[in-house]
Image (cartoon, rainbow, N blue to C red):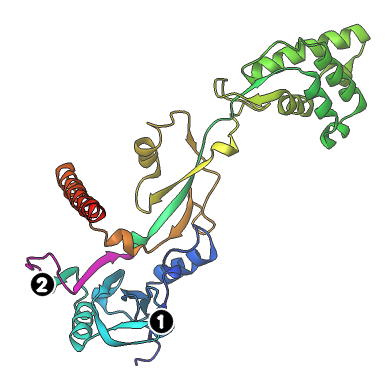
Amino acid sequence: MQRGGGRVGVVHNGSPLFTGDAGSGESEIRRHILEHDYLDCIVALPTDMFYNTNITTYLWFLSNRKSPERQGQVLLIDASAMSVLMKKNLGKKRREFTPDCVTRIARAYADFQTMQWQENPDSPDGKTGRTLKAKRFDRAHFFYRKVTIERPLRMRFQASAEALRLLGYDSAFGKLAQEQQDLLTQAIQAMDAQATYLDADSLRAALTAMATDVATRHGWTGKAAKLSAKSLELARKYLGSKDKNAEPTTNEKGEVLSDSELRDAEYVPFHEDIAAYFDREVYPHWPDAWINHEVRDAQDDKTGVVGTEINFNREFYVYTPPRSREDIAKDIEAKEQKFMELLRGIQGEVRA
């Protein structure tokens, strides 16, 4: 081993490959390994390879002294179909590597290139036997950004007696100056309980006008004659109910409020432009949505939280087209004929 460096191999189950969302401890560990270019190769082993477990396992090879041609690169090897059945099981161990399996896997690791090998590619019965696949990736391939997508809160407003009753229980209402409590309560009571407002601006305008009338009748002046921003906020909170047909709800500063129940996340490939991704994947479906740029990564301070994931199933997935309707119909017909033959045989035995 060279001074100041080393290599290590670790056996894991599948969880360390993908467990944990962006920003989680598991994702940050993977991020640290990839950012420092420690990950050299991961090999997916077959199931039933160990005495006490039959789950799929993975070999991680890490190094802090990669050769120049391997720097910034990661090799994934799918050796899940590179084993043979044992003549006699050992606990849960049913499969093993032959010397040829080991040689081919080691060669794929040494070559460090995308490749694919099949033992019997031209087999007439479609059974290919052992297969080995390897794919080489830039390490950035395993990074993504979890971008928060917001949609507007839509509410309609009515000055109902029930809403006013609930407002009275709010601790924030109790902290208002007494003159504000009186003005807000009487203004709500004086409003038409049957009137419906489909946007917050209309509610605030109607409530402010009614508060002015109330203050005039009572001869209130100064702060006691005008609703504060906090009073208007409490009125908006308690007089509103969700309505998808209403206009987007704004706060007292005119900013559109987001609906936490409609909040979603998009997982954007690391080097893809977030705005372009949003325009292509989100906007056509939700024209009122927007990117929450306040949710940023703690390390690079860019929009979206950086996450990492190594998904073998996705990288080595091969699409298999579904069977045709004609083939399925033929199978059903054949089974029906076989069933009828069995039924006729049973009927014949009963008559006999």
Q: Secondary structure at mark 2?
A: loop
Q: Position of residue 306 (x, y in %)?
A: 46, 56
Q: Position of residue 203 (x, y in %)?
A: 69, 17
**Residue occupied by mark 1:** 10
State the extent of the magenta-drawn residues as a range: 119-139
Q: Earlier in the sequence, mark 2 or mark 1?
A: 1
Q: Nearer the viewer, mark 2 or mark 1?
A: 2
Q: Give the CA distance from mark 2 to mark 1.
A: 32 Å
Residue appearing at x 30%, y 70% in the figure: 74
Q: Which mark is residue 219?
A: none
Q: Is residue 197 found left or right of 313 in the rendered image?
A: right
Quadrant of res 157: top right
Q: Secondary structure at mark 1?
A: strand
Amino acid found under the numbered disc labelled 1: Val
Give the camera-side residue of 295 and 167: 167
**Residue occupied by mark 2:** 120
Q: Is residue 80 above or below residue 220?
A: below
Give the camera-side residue of 89 and 76: 89
Q: Is residue 122 found left or right of 3 in the rendered image?
A: left
Name the quadrant of the N terminus. Answer: bottom left
Q: Position of residue 14 (x, y in %)?
A: 41, 70
Residue 128 part of the magenta segment:
yes
Give the camera-side residue of 300 and 38: 38
Q: Residues within 10 Å of mark 1 (few under 14, many from 20)?
A: few
Residue appearing at x 44%, y 31% in the figure: 286
Residue 229 part of the magenta segment:
no
